[in-house]
Amino acid sequence: MSQPRQSGPASTPSGSSRIAAILAHLSAPIAALLSAGTLSLLGPLLVWLVKKDDPYARRAAAGAFNFNLSFWVLYLLSWLLVATIIGAVIGIPLLIVLFLVSAWCHIKGAVRAADDRTYDYPFQIRVLS
């Protein structure tokens, strides 16, 4: 018989796990700001690759990566809408909403990681786990 899935980690994560999880959550918006949005997937992916054996950091990095992948698709759609005259009416507000939701989710994830709690991002295309 399978046991129910826990919402948080079974034990308190180590200091390095906590820092890696915080870095996974914050690396995407930092990289996005430094690269005009093109490298937001790189930070969480690097944390995921380096911390594969750390379940707490790996889960945070996978969530951040999957969330950013979803938002890349939505940003691309928004920019395509902005490129059309009629779609700009929808595309520009959508870009603003996407930016605000993304910032909120990453900050919320980092705060939860600092408190040794997990954060499940909404709107994920699950690629990494």
Image (tube, grey):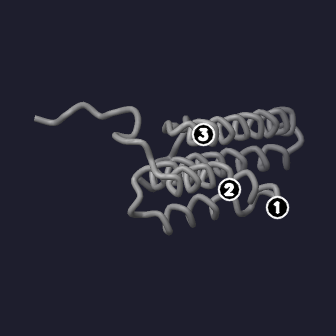
- Quarter of image, res 3: top left
Q: Sequence order check: which comes first, mark 1 or mark 3?
A: 1
Question: If the image is split into quadrants, where does the N terminus sit?
Answer: top left
Q: Which residue occupies 70% across, 34% down?
A: 104
Sequence-wise, the earlier of marks 2 and 1 is 2
Q: Residue drawn at (74%, 62%), measured in percent from left and top? A: 38
- Residue 2 in percent (x, y) is at 16, 36
Q: Decide: few, some or many residues near mark 3? Use Cα within 10 Å; few <14, some 14-19, many ≥20.
A: many
Q: Residues within 10 Å of mark 1 (few under 14, many from 20)?
A: few
How far from the left and from the top, in percent, is residue 45? 56, 63
Say above or below: 46 vs 84: below
Instruction: Answer with left or right where residue 64 lies relative to residue 127.
Output: right
The label nearer to you, 1 versus 3, is: 3
Say which residue label 3 marks: 109
Alpha carbon distance from label 1 to label 3: 20 Å
Please tell me whether mark 3 sits on a helix, a strand or a loop.
helix
Disc 2 packing (10 Å; few <14; some 14–19; many ≥20):
many
Checking the image for residue 27, the label placed there is 2
Tell me the amino acid under the disc marked 1. Answer: Leu
Asked whether residue 86 is in view, the answer is yes
User: Is residue 59 toward the left or the right of residue 2 in the image?
Assistant: right
Q: Quadrant of residue 103?
A: top right
Does residue 9 sit above or below 37 in this rendering?
A: above
The answer, for residue 120, to whether it is visible in the render is no
Q: Nearer the viewer, residue 70 or 106?
A: 106
Residue for badge 1:
34
Q: Could you say where residue 107 lies in the image, as x and y percent from the top left?
A: 69, 39
Element on which disc 2 rests: helix
Mark closest to the chain's N terminus, 2 or 3: 2
